[in-house]
Image (cartoon, rainbow, N blue to C red):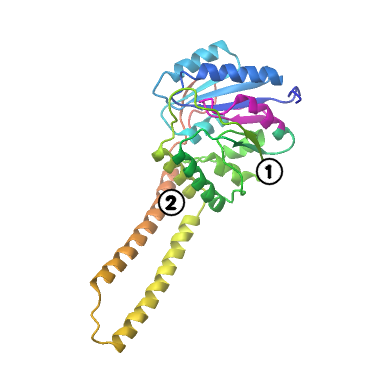
Amino acid sequence: MKKLTDPACTLSIVVPVYRSAQILPKLVEQIQAEMLKEGLIDKFELLLVNDASPDNSWQVIRSLAQQHGFIKGISLRRNFGQHNTIMAGLHYVSGDFIVLMDDDLQHPPHAIGDMVRALRAGYDVCYTNYLNRQHAAWKKLGSQFNDWVATRLLGKPKGLYLSSFKGLRKEIAQEIIQYDGPYAYVDGLILDVTRSITTINIEHQERQDGEGNYNLRRSVSLWMKMATSFSVLPLRLATYTGFALAAISSILIVVVLVQKFLHPDITAGWASLIATILFIGGIQTLCIGVMGEYLGRTYLKLNRKPQFVVGGTTWPSPRHEQA
């Protein structure tokens, strides 16, 4: 396996940080070792983006930045979520190739070189495919559902796993950060920009410390971002459902009238009437909720709800602090 010794090759690694103060020194150590093996020790930068972590992650990042010149620390003023934190980091990258990875060492740093090689071969994006996912059963089921929905809502190629460990070319990142909406979904933005995508297989590692930060509520919130920020299919489904119910209702009205004429003594059923009302009412409420979700997101974007707000960096930066 050849080293990435091309002098034109520069790399930016973006890591959203949340509740990982104990893991960060080990993460930095392993990434540094891999960059040395790949011949990129003087051609890479590591951007650690603190998502208002409640522990002392920011203090650890500042300390690491003083020890290592390749580290750039960015701290957000409040918690914006993983994808918005990644977007913040993408505004500060300078490398020709960019790798996005988590802060818990479940993503092996030794796979970074393979991703960069795939990008240098001409692909715009390189995702990783986990061979042995170290996640709870409900997360695996949720990922399968998310994969099924993403295939239909975003036009995701079948068989492509949208992992959080991925690499992309600088020009793709520049297109992605043009999006200034408050609800960022990085994979949706990638699929909007390109279909030149490849994958590599990796061994998913066990989390080194603590527990994962994605609970059921955050997973559902992420799914809603994907469903309502990058596709109008839910609105179309609501429309189709309305048409279908209208057609069924028309048929049932005809059936009831015919039965009444043929059998005048038949008493209308209270249970069936209530069931019909509840069913139609539930569908109407669902459709109104879907439309409300779209309108709410539009309202927040028009009112310029920030995607992220940078509170500080470990180096003097003239860039804007809000996006």
Magenta residues span 91-117
Residue 156, above or below 108:
below
User: Looking at the rendering, which quadrant does residue 311 occupy?
Assistant: top left
Q: Which residue is mark 2?
A: 294
Front in this rendered view, residue 242 or 152: 152
Residue 254, above or below 273:
below
Residue 255, above or below 90:
below
State which quarter of the image contains the N terminus.
Answer: top right
The amino acid beneath tag 1 is Ser
Q: Is residue 2 magenta?
A: no
Of tags 2 and 1, the one toward the viewer is: 1
* Marker disc for residue 196: 1
Query: Which residue corresponds to the image point at 42% horizontal and 30% vertical from the top-left?
Result: 79
Q: Is residue 101 magenta?
A: yes
User: Looking at the rendering, which quadrant does residue 100 occupy?
Assistant: top right
Query: In the rendered image, is residue 275 in sight?
Result: yes
Query: Which residue corresponds to the image point at 44% horizontal and 41% vertical from the top-left?
Result: 138
What kind of element bears circle 2? helix
Front in this rendered view, residue 149 or 201: 201
